[in-house]
Amino acid sequence: MANTYKRILLKLSGESLMGDEGFGISPKMIRHYAEEIKQVISTGVEVAIVIGGGNIFRGLQAKDNGIQRIQGDYMGMLATCINGMALQGVLESIGVYTRLVSAIEMREIAEPYIRRRAVRHLEKGRVIIFSGGTGSPYFTTDSAAALRANEINADVLLKGTRVDGIYDKDPEKHADAKRYDNITFDEVINKNLKIMDMTAFTLCNENNMPVVVLDIHQPGNLMKLIQGESIGTRVTQ
């Protein structure tokens, strides 16, 4: 079966790495992600990943701890590097070649981000794990995902969540919530649906980068989406 996409950027939240642990990294969850990614890579799809750090520290928590926002944001970026190293380790343990790339220089553990080099890694079949966010405070990992997706000319930005798409209201609180199969960027804005932060969303809209929100916890969903099945919600112009 032909793949719908040749090159994808997958955004994974740090919180989802916790699984049922409540904090840190769940071995079961990170193994699940690695297996899903390996399955997709085996079909020839080029995969880049942006991973959050909310399971360890969120920059927005800083003010509650008496830490300056900018300092807190950098702490959050370092948390994404820890998650990136963990995902890299598990992926390589199951035979997937990877490169960990950081927007903040730390030569001993990750390559610095150079766009042309990152694209070349993808062309060679390596999974790129982007860590360190954008390298600047005040930007979320959603923004980092949107930025990197556009920079590497990905076919789509996939936002992996625990919900199976975009709803008109919170499906965990409202039994009558309606799920959208397809929706436009303008409709999301007009309906005030919270998909990702507005900076990231605007960047995708302006550059015609489609976004798909899917339940990444459901085994096989990523592969089904790649092969053209209607999984999650697709946001386009």
Image (cartoon, rainbow, N blue to C red):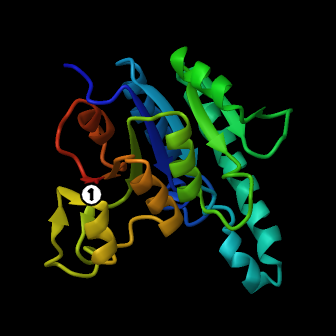
* Image coords of residue 152 (percent x, y): 53, 33
Query: Horizontally, is 159 left or right of 222 in the view?
Result: right
The answer to which quarter of the image holds residue 105 is: top right
Instruction: Please tell me which residue lies in front, 65 or 119.
Output: 119
* Image coords of residue 56 (percent x, y): 67, 62
For the N terminus, the image quarter is top left
Query: Horizontally, is 162 left or right of 237 in the view?
Result: right
Residue under label 1:
164
Instruction: Please tell me which residue lies in front, 39 or 119.
Output: 119
- Please name the amino acid that badge 1 sits on: Asp
In the picture as drawn, the residue positioned furthest to the top comes out as 124
Element carrying mark 1: loop
* Image coords of residue 206 (percent x, y): 43, 54
**Residue found 68% across the figure and 33% down from its top:** 100
The answer to which quarter of the image holds residue 68 is: bottom right
- Looking at the rendered structure, the number of numbered marks drawn on it comes to 1
Query: Horizontally, is 180 left or right of 237 in the view?
Result: left
Height in image: 215 above or below 95? below
Q: Is residue 93 shown to the viewer in this render?
A: no
For the C terminus, the image quarter is bottom left
Dot 1, crowdedness within 10 Å: few (<14), some or many (≥20)?
many
The answer to which quarter of the image holds residue 113 is: top right
**Residue found 51% across the figure and 50% down from its top:** 146
Height in image: 201 above or below 26? below
* Image coords of residue 209 (percent x, y): 39, 46
Height in image: 103 above or below 199? above
Q: Is residue 53 shown to the viewer in this render?
A: yes
Height in image: 192 above or below 225? below
Query: Horizontally, is 69 left or right of 231 in the view?
Result: right
**Residue found 65% across the figure and 31% down from its top:** 115
